[in-house]
Each structure stands twice: as C-alpha cells, then as structure tokens.
C-alpha cells in the first residue's frame, strides 16, 4: 500500500471535511501490521488559543474505551478467573443484579454483546465526580431506574436476557466491576487496565480516569466543542459513573496500536495482551444485528461482512459534550484507522449516523478506498463533488424517494440551476449540479445506489449511504455496500 498516496489525499480532503462538518480539529492514525504508518493532525485542538491538533493531542474517546474493558475481562477469562458463559452473580459479592424479565442468569457474554436485558443508559453522567465504581453500581441497581430523563424515557431493564441487542453503558460498567473484583492483584479497574493492557502495548499516552492523569498529558488534552447551528460552546466538565464504558483518554496513535494488536492475534512486538484464539473470538460474530443493521456483534466489537475473512470491524465513541471517535480495522490485511475529533453536535438523532460522527466517517471513507486498492485522491474538485452530490440528492428527493415515474425535464433542470442560491464561499459548480440532475437513474433505488457508488468520491460516500433513499433500505434490497 502506498502510504504517501493516502497522506496526500488526506492533506487535500481533511480540511474540506472539517469545514463541511463544522469540526474544529481531528487527529488521525493509520496502522498496518505492527506499527502506525501515518499520523496526522488537522485543524485546531483549541479555538481560543489556536493550539493545533497534532498526533500527540490527547482526546477522550468515549465508548471506544469499551474495547479496553472487554479485553481486560477476556484476559481474566483466559486465566480462569471469569467464565464467559457462567453466571456473573457469584463474582459480584453483595451487589444483586437480576433481570426481572426472565429467569436465566446474566453471563459475561451477554454483557459483552449488549444482550443482558439492561436498557440504554447515558452512563449515569453528572457534573460532579461519581462514587467509586462498586458504590455507584450498588446505587444504580437499588434505584432500579435508567438515567435518561430521570428514568422516564427508558427503563433500567427492558427485555429478557439474550432476547435482543440493547446498547448499555451500565452493562459494560458491570464488566469493569467484574474485572475489579476478580483480577489477581485486587487492583482498582483503572489500575489493572493500565498494567495489563496499556503497558504491554507501550501505550504511554493512555489513561482511564478516575485514575490520575499526569499533568503533562492533561496539558495535551484538546478542548471539546458542543456545536449547534453556527455556535460552538465549551460546556462544563461531565463525569461518568459507568466509567469503564467510556472515560478513557488517549491519542489516535495509541488507540491504533491497540487495534492492531487485537487484529494481529492479541500482540505487538512490545507485548501480548490476548491469546490468538481469544483475539479471534472477540472479532467473531456472536449474535445477530447490533446498532447497525449491516453489522453483527462480536465481543463488544461491531463486525461487518464477516469481519475476519474479507470484512472489517469497528467501534465508535463520544464523550460529553465535545468529542467523537471513529475506529475501523481490517483483520485480513491488518490495517486500522482511528479518527479523534473535538466536536459533539447537539442537534442529533441519537444514532451511529449522527452529525458528530460525520468527520470520522468521511475520513474513514477515504482510508477504506485506499485499503480496497482505489486511488484515495478524488477525481472531482471540491466544487464539482459537492455540487454533484447536491444535484444527486435533489434528483433522489424528487423521483426515487417519492416513487415518482417522472424524471426531471430539461426545462426543470435549467430552472433549478438558474434559481440556485449559493451562500458566499460555498464551492459551486453548476455544470456538475446539472449533470447529476440529468444523469440520475431514477428507475429504482438499487440502480441509483449502484450508479452513485461509481460516481461519488470516496470521502463523500458516507453521506450517500445515509441520505440516498431510506437509510439502509438500498443495502438490504440490493446487497450494496456504500
């Protein structure tokens, strides 16, 4: 793989992506084999001071830290201190965790595949530091209510054990508590993960608060921005009670090293964290669909297209209210990409396609094209690409999405081009807009998606997959991967 070609493409495309997504900055790491082969920073880590985002910038990675917690638990399975398919109750002491919707005991596998029956939670976050993990979980299960809008929106327990996927930060917090109670050193969770996961992989810029973060590292932490409309706010610090589910701080390069280790059988030259068999198991589908209808679920990881053979695995994360993380890895080629950004979009629908993830998804599209052997440099100029995409979406809305059998006439296309209002500074190519309107294959969604797959630059394909037709419908109907 030509790493220099990818670097040139990123240098051209990432500034455009940052502007398109209102993202202050991103730190990107791409790994191949045993090492990080490309590390870049773009934009700003702090808008007020003008501090640039660099490969050394430390960012909260939110739920991407669940993968650290899962590995720590599987290390203890390997040691015989936890059983993947045994009841968790005997390891919890006086903490009583019983799903009221069914008699089957909860297992570690249930927790790692989000099938314990626990409902979705925000991690019991607050603007004051939480109680220690065990005390916090005792409070949660005594109260028996979710944290979302005071427990009025989603119940703490939503389904019987094993019935369906239900993403739960509290479920992963329970995994962290199991690690804390069963590790042979009797260490707190954050200390055990540092010793057993971060140190062997030489992850020198990674910590799991509430553990102590060195002042030097804290000084490298980016400022997170909550964005809405044309505003960007620095909101007060938010603390997470379910902290094994998402408080880790790291650099894109450190996290990329971790992903490479999991993809490569559980080890890097610096050390081993899992056996090859366990690492493979984590990336093997364990159950049905997860948060994304195109994915199955491994042990915490989302698995696409089979994962281990020709597909890829991934996760993602956010931290309140200013950071987003995107992770993708290809086991067969042992390539990984991590994109850390300092933005959280406040006006979002609460799905994996929310605006906060767009910068990562678009950059991930560039790297995916490169991994698949395509030239990551776009064939269209920014003006032509954006104008063409706008024309394609207009054509879709007026024909395929409505089920209309009447394509746009030449006169209607001329009127659309003539009447377009373009804000100052917006890249605009009226002929590219016109060509998309004229050439759009309105006969069927499957044809439209196949056509767009050939036409849309790699860095804009994530927009197409979420906007064209009904999200995921085309993939389910036509079997197409955008």
Image: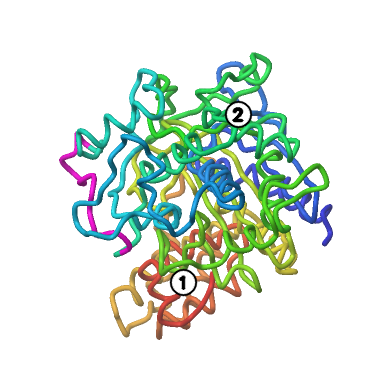
- Nearer to us in this view, 204 or 375: 204
Q: Quadrant of residue 208?
A: top right
Could you tell me which residue is drawn at 55 percent across and 63 percent down? 461
Task: Name the quadrant of the N terminus.
Answer: bottom right
The location of residue 77, given as percent across then percent down, is 56, 51
The location of residue 155, given as percent across then percent down, is 20, 46
Left or right: residue 421 versus residue 117 is: right
- Nearer to us in this view, 30 or 370: 30
Secondary structure under the numbered disc 2 in the rendered image: loop
Could you tell me which residue is drawn at 44 percent across and 32 percent down? 243
The location of residue 327, given as percent across then percent down, is 59, 50
Rounded to the nearest angstrom, the CA distance separating label 1 from label 2 is 50 Å
Up-down: is 10 above or below 312? above
Q: Is residue 314 visible?
A: yes
Magenta span dominant secondary structure: loop
Q: Which residue is mark 1?
A: 437
- Nearer to us in this view, 478 or 136: 136
Could you tell me which residue is drawn at 34 percent across and 38 percent down? 122
Q: How is the image coloured?
A: rainbow
Q: Earlier in the sequence, mark 1 or mark 2?
A: 2
Q: Quadrant of residue 458?
A: bottom right
Secondary structure under the numbered disc 1 in the rendered image: helix
Left or right: residue 129 versus residue 342 is: left
Up-down: is 251 above or below 367? above
**Residue 207 - label:** 2
Q: Is there a contact, CB below 8 Å, between mark 1 and mark 2?
A: no
Q: Which residues are magenta?
A: 149-162
* Residue, far top: 215
Magenta-span inclusion, residue 78: no
């Amino acid at each position: 793989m030509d790493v220099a070609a990818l670097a040139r493409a990123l240098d051209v495309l990432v500034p455009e992506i940052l502007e398109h997504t209102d993202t202050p900055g991103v730190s990107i790491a791409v790994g191949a084999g045993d090492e990080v082969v490309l590390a870049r920073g773009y934009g700003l880590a702090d808008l007020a001071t003008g501090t640039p985002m660099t490969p050394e910038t430390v960012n909260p990675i939110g739920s991407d830290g669940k993968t650290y917690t899962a590995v720590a638990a599987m290390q203890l399975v390997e040691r015989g201190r936890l059983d993947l398919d045994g009841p968790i109750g005997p390891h919890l002491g006086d903490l009583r965790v019983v799903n009221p919707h069914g008699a089957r005991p909860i297992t570690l596998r249930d927790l790692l595949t989000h099938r314990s029956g626990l409902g979705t939670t925000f991690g019991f976050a607050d603007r004051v530091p939480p109680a220690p993990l065990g005390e916090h979980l005792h409070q949660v299960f005594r109260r028996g209510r979710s944290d979302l809008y005071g427990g009025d929106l989603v119940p703490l327990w939503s389904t019987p054990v094993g019935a369906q996927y239900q993403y739960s930060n509290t479920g992963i917090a329970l995994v962290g508590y199991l690690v804390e109670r069963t590790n042979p050193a009797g260490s707190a969770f954050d200390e055990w993960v540092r010793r057993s996961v971060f140190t062997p992989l030489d992850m020198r810029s990674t910590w799991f608060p509430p553990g102590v973060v060195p002042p030097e590292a804290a000084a490298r932490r980016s400022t997170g921005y909550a964005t809405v409309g044309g505003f960007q706010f620095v909101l007060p610090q938010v603390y997470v009670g379910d902290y094994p589910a998402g408080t880790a701080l790291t650099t894109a390069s450190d996290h990329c090293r971790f992903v490479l280790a999991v993809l490569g059988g559980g080890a890097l030259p610096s050390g081993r964290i899992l056996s090859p068999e366990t690492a493979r198991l984590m990336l093997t589908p364990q159950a049905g669909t997860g948060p994304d209808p195109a994915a199955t679920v491994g042990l915490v990881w989302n698995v696409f297209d089979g994962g281990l053979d020709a597909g890829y695995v991934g996760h993602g994360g956010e931290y309140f209210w200013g950071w987003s993380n995107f992770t993708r890895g290809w086991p067969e080629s042992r390539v990984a990409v991590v994109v850390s950004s300092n933005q959280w979009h406040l006006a979002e629908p609460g799905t994996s396609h929310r605006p906060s993830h767009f910068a990562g998804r678009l950059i991930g599209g560039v790297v995916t094209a490169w991994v698949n052997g395509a030239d990551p440099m776009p064939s269209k100029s920014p003006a032509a690409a954006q104008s063409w995409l706008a024309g394609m979406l207009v054509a879709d809305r007026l024909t395929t999405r409505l089920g209309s059998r009447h394509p746009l006439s030449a006169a209607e296309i001329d009127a659309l081009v003539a009447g377009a209002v373009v804000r100052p500074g917006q890249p605009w190519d009226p002929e590219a807009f016109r060509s998309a309107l004229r050439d759009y294959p309105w006969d069927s969604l499957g044809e439209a998606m196949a056509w767009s797959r050939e036409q849309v630059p790699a860095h804009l394909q994530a927009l197409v997959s979420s906007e064209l037709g009904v999200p995921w419908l085309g993939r389910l109907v036509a079997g197409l991967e955008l």
